[in-house]
Image (cartoon, rainbow, N blue to C red):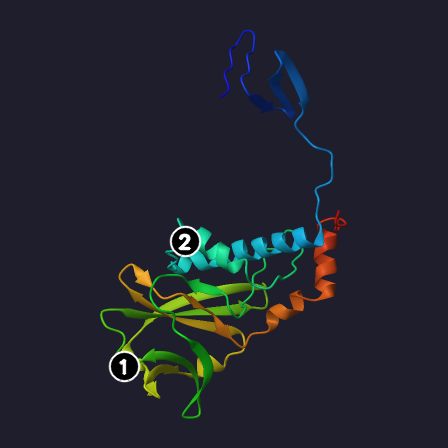
Amino acid sequence: MKTKKNKGVMVVGSLRTDGVTTYMKQGKLILRSATSMEKRSNTLRQFEQRQKMRHAVALWKKFKYSKPMFTERATAYGNFVSLARKLPVVYVEECRDFSFVMPGMPISDGRLPAIKEKLGEVDGEPALITDLKVGAVVGGKLWLYTAEQDKDYNTVRFDKRQVDLDEMVAVDGCYALKGKEFANPMRGWALVLVNGERCSPQTIVTRCTYYQRFTTEEALQAAAKSYKGLTKDVW
């Protein structure tokens, strides 16, 4: 709690303003600089965690416009970021808002059973093959999310559309979706089952490997340099 009067300033707790922190200690008014001159610790482990957070946020900035369903935390943003931070680290230089299509990227999170999905061929055509049994979609909808890598801007574009059951084909009693698009090496997909406020937890399946050029030692060193380098671990 802080209180301030025009005459005779009284501070309960602390007050930070104009680079100075003011607080009471043992009945005395103490003034000290609010700006630390100590270099921020940036060990490799800390740097990697910060890079994971940076990438998760960059992905969400693009993904949120598709209105994805993440229902297992207080906010969709918090739910997505907690999952996206488990992805492999990609090293990006400071002030670059890059994002990448990666296998395992979270697309939804909910209480319905997850659908196993993979890329393959059906009748000689590229296809997204699932283990969703024919007839299992009762009162629900299927949404197909597409993530596409933009190499010019090093960012991901997202899209979604509802899939009608008559678009699907049966493969060993399970649904599959055929189309030339599923051969695109710069895209990834996830088919999400939605029933009211519930959805299946799904992640991207993709052949895209573009992100791997940002996982190398060279990428690490370039990114670290832009953040004024790494600090040594203190044991």
Examine the rendered structure and indicate whether residue 121 appears above or below residue 33.
below
The residue nearer to you, when weighing 135 against 100, is 135
Identify the residue shown where x is 23% and y is 72%.
138
The percent coordinates of residue 5 (x first, y second) are 51, 11
Residue at disc 2, secondary structure: helix
Examine the rendered structure and indicate whether residue 51 appears above or below residue 37.
below
Residue farthest to the front? 235
Identify the residue shown where x is 52% and y is 64%.
156
The percent coordinates of residue 139 (x first, y second) are 22, 69
The percent coordinates of residue 42 (x first, y second) are 70, 48
Q: Amino acid at mark 1?
A: Asp
Q: Amino acid at mark 2?
A: Ala
Q: Which of disc 1 and disc 2 is earlier in sequence?
A: 2
- The residue to which callout 2 is attached is 76
**CA separation in Å, label 2 and label 1:** 31 Å
Examine the rendered structure and indicate whether residue 196 appears above or below residue 135.
above
* Disc number placed over residue 166 in the picture, else none: 1
Residue farthest to the bottom? 123
Q: From the image, state whether disc 2 or disc 1 is nearer to you.
A: 2
Q: Dot 1: within a 10 Å radius of its alpha carbon, few (fewer than 14), some, or many (20 or more) residues? A: few
Residue at disc 1, secondary structure: helix
The percent coordinates of residue 171 (x first, y second) are 36, 87
